[in-house]
Image (cartoon, rainbow, N blue to C red):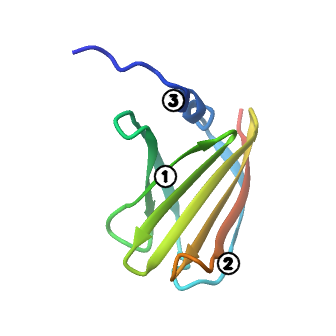
């Protein structure tokens, strides 16, 4: 078995490695979490996309987003039983990024759920 070849998507994801600190704003929604969240990324070379397993305090299983980079922005979406969710990570510099998560019940009308800006610690 040979090691996988690193792609541009791997190098883009590597920009998110580290310990980050920042501020978030939560907006009222049907899915407002009352606790912490955590995302784990992976690159799927067969489909050439990036997956994110999103863990939060609202449910026992992770939500699975799929997407790709458009320049310095990782855009991802997920279909859920209650509607749709989308997330974006804009890498604004080597040591900062902004994050947004929106929700929609019909996939057309979107409402902000989380907005944040982060800087790398250390």
Residue that appears at 71% across and 38% down: 121
Which residue matches tag 2? 27
CA gap, disc 3 and disc 2: 32 Å
Query: Would you place residue 64 above or below residue 60 in this image?
Result: above
Pointer 3 with pointer 1, Cβ within 8 A: no
Mark 3, residues whose alpha carbon is within 10 Å: few (<14), some, or many (≥20)?
A: some
Residue that appears at 75% across and 36% down: 95
The x and y percentages for residue 6 are 46, 21
On screen, residue 109 versus residue 51, left or right, reads right
Tag shown at residue 108 = none
Tag shown at residue 39 = 1
Q: Secondary structure at mark 2?
A: loop
Which residue matches tag 3? 10
CA gap, disc 3 and disc 1: 16 Å
Query: Would you place residue 34 above or below residue 22 in this image?
Result: below
On screen, residue 3 versus residue 75, left or right, reads left
The x and y percentages for residue 14 are 57, 30
The x and y percentages for residue 20 are 66, 44
Q: Residue 96's quadrant in the figure?
A: top right
Pointer 1 with pointer 2, Cβ within 8 A: no
The x and y percentages for residue 48 are 43, 37
On screen, residue 62 versus residue 84, left or right, reads left
Of marks 3 and 1, the one in the foreground: 3
Q: Secondary structure at mark 3?
A: helix
Q: Residue 4's quadrant in the figure?
A: top left
Q: Residue 102's quadrant in the figure?
A: bottom right
Q: Quadrant of the C terminus?
A: top right
Q: Secondary structure at mark 1?
A: strand
């Amino acid at each position: 078995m040979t090691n996988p070849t690193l792609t541009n998507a791997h190098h883009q994801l590597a920009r998110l490695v580290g310990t980050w600190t920042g501020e978030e704003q939560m907006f009222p929604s049907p899915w407002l979490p009352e606790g912490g969240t955590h995302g784990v990324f992976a690159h799927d070379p067969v489909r050439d996309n990036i997956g994110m397993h999103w863990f939060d305090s609202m449910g026992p299983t992770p939500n699975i987003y799929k997407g790709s980079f458009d320049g310095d922005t990782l855009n991802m979406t997920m279909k859920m039983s209650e509607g749709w969710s989308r997330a974006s990570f804009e890498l604004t510099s080597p040591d900062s990024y902004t994050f947004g998560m929106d929700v929609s019940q019909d996939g057309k009308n979107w409402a902000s759920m989380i907005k944040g800006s982060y800087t790398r610690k250390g």
